[in-house]
Image: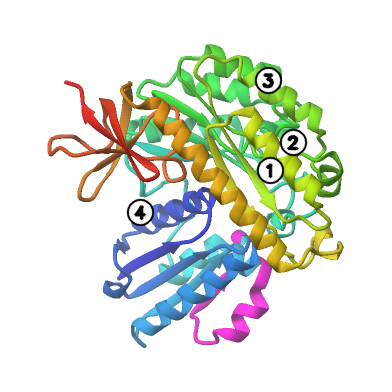
Amino acid sequence: MKVNLISLGCPKNLVDSEKILGSLGAAGVEICAMPEDSDIIIINTCAFIEPAIVETEKEIKKALAFASNKRVYVHGCGVNRYAKRLKDAFPEIAGFSTLEQTKKLLCSIQTDSRVSQTRLLTTQGYAYLKIADGCSNFCSYCTIPMIKGAYKSVDIDSLLRESTELAELGVKELILIAQDTTAYGMDLYDKPMLVELIRGISNLPGINWIRIMYAHPNSLSDEMINEIRTNKKVCKYIDLPIQHISDRILKLMNRGMTKRQIRDQFRKLKQIKGISLRTTVIAGFPGETDIEFKELVNFIEDINIDWLGVFSFYRETGTQAAEFDQLPEHVIEERYQELLKLQQKIIQITNRKKIGETHKTLIHHKNTQYKGHTQYTCPEIDSNVLINTDDLMLGEFCNARFTSLNGCDINAEVVR
């Protein structure tokens, strides 16, 4: 039996996918790289916003078109949110399973399969460590609480065991992910425990870098900022999504922060020597005025961030924001495009500053050339370091001197 898995959506989904593959592999199922070569196709779905469920439906159609003798299973967030929609549209699917029904999925494919923490890694050199799932912030635009429920931290002992196993597999960098990483532990231990978790991981031989993604400005503590400053294994990098900066819009979003508080968090982070800052914003939130949009653009330009993620606002059924007075679609699109232009400008400025510098680089991919990243960039979302040579090893470090820009990426040569 050959199984192929298509993982859609965020890195949190990817971790789930890797564990599904690990469990099936441990039960003796052959994992297949290409869907056309497989007997069974699993689609681990995303349904965070409307384009995600549209992509899910597109992938289901493609999978069903391969051959009539293949079994296709649909799993995860898309089923949690849109089970009826998907079941009505695709009655030929062999089985649907929610996030809570992973065991059902596994047993449908191989009756003696067991849910385990074993992972079949799909990345080289780095791996994602999902430290929590779900969310209890209830931002007015967000579907995560209705898909995944309340915030649920994974206990520290389990995470340290998983981190140890990943290190033994040759992983050099752990990227910590959750809906709100800096709130880690509050539900289990009645206090934030991210610093304690990071210190535990730092003691593991083989782990060189620890990266923090999806931090929330409201749960980012001074203790955590100091840990980034002082812990040599913590990347001088943080992803701190703000979504907006207007006090009125932040209140409508239910972000629990003010402009002044957000600015203060960035001020503290910028005191860390060499820190690389990433944030994410939403274009066209309901009721956003021209003045408030300009306020957001000016703030992004003023704080001199290194990386910017941009999303259009989508009116998601079941969220509070779906009931607000909506902006015309053309206004949302215009503001989205303006922020994309700012994003490109920021990338060019960030990369141009690095020309001539030499940085420790983790090689994570090879196609026609090697691709890597430094501690100041996150793989898959920030710029790649591109190296033309033939003697590097995936998953290993090299010293790379940056030579020139290459679109959104940067060319480099190995320093021997």
Q: Give amino acid for label 4.
A: Ala
Label 1 neighbour load within 10 Å: few <14, some 14-19, many 20+:
many
Q: Residue at x 66, y 33 (%)?
A: 184
Circles 2 and 1: CB atoms closer than 8 Å: yes
Q: Earlier in the sequence, mark 1 or mark 4?
A: 4
Q: Which residue is mark 2?
A: 187
Q: CA distance from mark 2 to mark 4?
A: 32 Å
Locate the N terminus and report the quarter of the image it occupies.
bottom left
**Residue 338 versus residue 99 in the image, above or below:** above
Q: Which mark is residue 152?
A: 1
Q: Which residue is mark 3?
A: 267
Query: Start and end of the magenta stretch?
Result: 81-99
Q: Is residue 191 left or right of residue 349?
A: right
Which one is closest to the eye, mark 1 or mark 3? 3
Q: Which residue is mark 4?
A: 26
Q: CA distance from mark 2 to mark 1?
A: 7 Å
Locate the C terminus and report the quarter of the image it occupies.
top left
Secondary element under disc 4, as helix, strand or loop, is helix
Label 3 neighbour load within 10 Å: few <14, some 14-19, many 20+:
few
Which one is closest to the eye, mark 2 or mark 4? 2
Q: CA distance from mark 1 to mark 3?
A: 30 Å
Q: Earlier in the sequence, mark 2 or mark 3?
A: 2
Q: Give amino acid for label 1.
A: Lys
Q: Earlier in the sequence, mark 2 or mark 1?
A: 1
Occupied quadrant, residue 195: top right
Horizontal and vertical percent for residue 48?
A: 64, 60
